[in-house]
C-alpha cells in the first residue's frame, strides 16, 4: 500500500493526482463503471455481476440503475435492500456505508473527497477524504449532495435538492441548503 493511500484512508491530506497506485485503482474502477453504464438494460445478471465486482461489500440484494460512477468502489458498503435510481455518483476515497432499506432518488452525489481551502495546498493537488455513513430505513430525495464526514441516522428522509454538510439525527425529516432536521418523526 502506498504512502498516499495510507494517508487517504487515515483522513489526512494526500496526493491523489500523482500516486500511480491510486490512479491505477481509479482507472480500473471507472472502466468497470463505463462498461456497466453502456450494457443493455435487459442484461440484468451481467450488469449485476459487474456491480458486484465494483462494490466493496453488499450485505444482500441491491439495485443501482445506470448511470453509476464511483472512484474506487472497494470503499462502498451496501446494506440489504439498497436501491439507487439513475445518475448516482459516489466518490469513495473513504468508506461510504449504507444501512438496510436505503432508497436513493436520481441525480445524487455522496462525496468523501474534499479539497483544502488554502489555495497553495489545493493547487498542489492535495485533498482529504472523510467517511460517510447512512443508517437504516433512509430515503434520499432527488438531487441531494452529501459531503465528507456526514452521518445520517436511521429512519431519516432527506428532501430533494438538499446539501447535507452536517450530521442528521435519526427519526427526522431534513431539508435545505444547508440541510437541517425540520421535524422529528418518532415521539419520545
Image: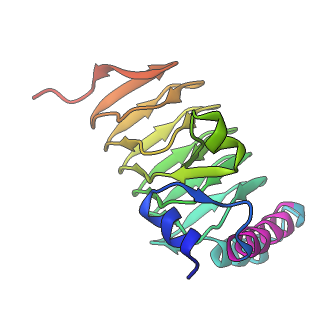
Q: Residue at x 74, y 70 (%)?
A: 29
Q: Residue at x 54, y 25 (%)?
A: 162
Would residue 130 appear left or right of 152 to someone viewing this image? right
Nearest the camera: 163 or 12? 12
Would residue 165 appear left or right of 118 to someone viewing this image? left
| Identity of the residue furthest to the front in this view | 120
Q: Main secondary structure of the magenta part?
A: helix
Q: Is residue 68 above or below residue 151?
A: below
| Identity of the residue furthest to the left in this view | 188
Query: Number of marks in the image?
Result: 0
Question: Where in the figure is residue 174, as x and y percent of width and height?
Answer: 40, 25
Q: Residue at x 77, y 75 (%)?
A: 28
Nearest the camera: 21 or 108? 21
Q: Quadrant of the N terminus?
A: bottom right
Specify whether residue 88 is painted magenta: no
Q: Indicate how the structure is coloured in the image.
A: rainbow
Q: Is residue 17 above or below residue 44?
A: above
Question: Where in the figure is residue 79, as x and y percent of width and height?
Answer: 44, 63
Would residue 130 appear left or right of 126 to someone viewing this image? left
Question: Where in the figure is residue 187, as x and y percent of width and height?
Answer: 15, 26
Specify whether residue 26 is painted magenta: yes
Question: Where in the figure is residue 188, as x and y percent of width and height?
Answer: 9, 29
In magenta, the rendered stretch is 21-37
Q: Residue at x 70, y 38 (%)?
A: 107
Q: Quadrant of residue 173?
A: top left
Amino acid at each position: 500500500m502506498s504512502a498516499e493511500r495510507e494517508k487517504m484512508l487515515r483522513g489526512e491530506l494526500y496526493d491523489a493526482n500523482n500516486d500511480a497506485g491510486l490512479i491505477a485503482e481509479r482507472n480500473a474502477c471507472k472502466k468497470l463503471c463505463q462498461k456497466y453504464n453502456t450494457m443493455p438494460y435487459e442484461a440484468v445478471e451481467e450488469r449485476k455481476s459487474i456491480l458486484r465486482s465494483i462494490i466493496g461489500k453488499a450485505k444482500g440484494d441491491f439495485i443501482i440503475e445506470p448511470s453509476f460512477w464511483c472512484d474506487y468502489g472497494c470503499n462502498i458498503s451496501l446494506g440489504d435492500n439498497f436501491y439507487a435510481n439513475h445518475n448516482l455518483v459516489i466518490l469513495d476515497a473513504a468508506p461510504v456505508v449504507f444501512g438496510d432499506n436505503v432508497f436513493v432518488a436520481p441525480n445524487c452525489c455522496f462525496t468523501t473527497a474534499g479539497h483544502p481551502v488554502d489555495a497553495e495546498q489545493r493547487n498542489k493537488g492535495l485533498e482529504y477524504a472523510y467517511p460517510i455513513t447512512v443508517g437504516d430505513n433512509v430515503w434520499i430525495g432527488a438531487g441531494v449532495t452529501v459531503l465528507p464526514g456526514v452521518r445520517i441516522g436511521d429512519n431519516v428522509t432527506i428532501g430533494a435538492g438538499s446539501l447535507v454538510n452536517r450530521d442528521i439525527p435519526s427519526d427526522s425529516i431534513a431539508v435545505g441548503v444547508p440541510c437541517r432536521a425540520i421535524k422529528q418523526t418518532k415521539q419520545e
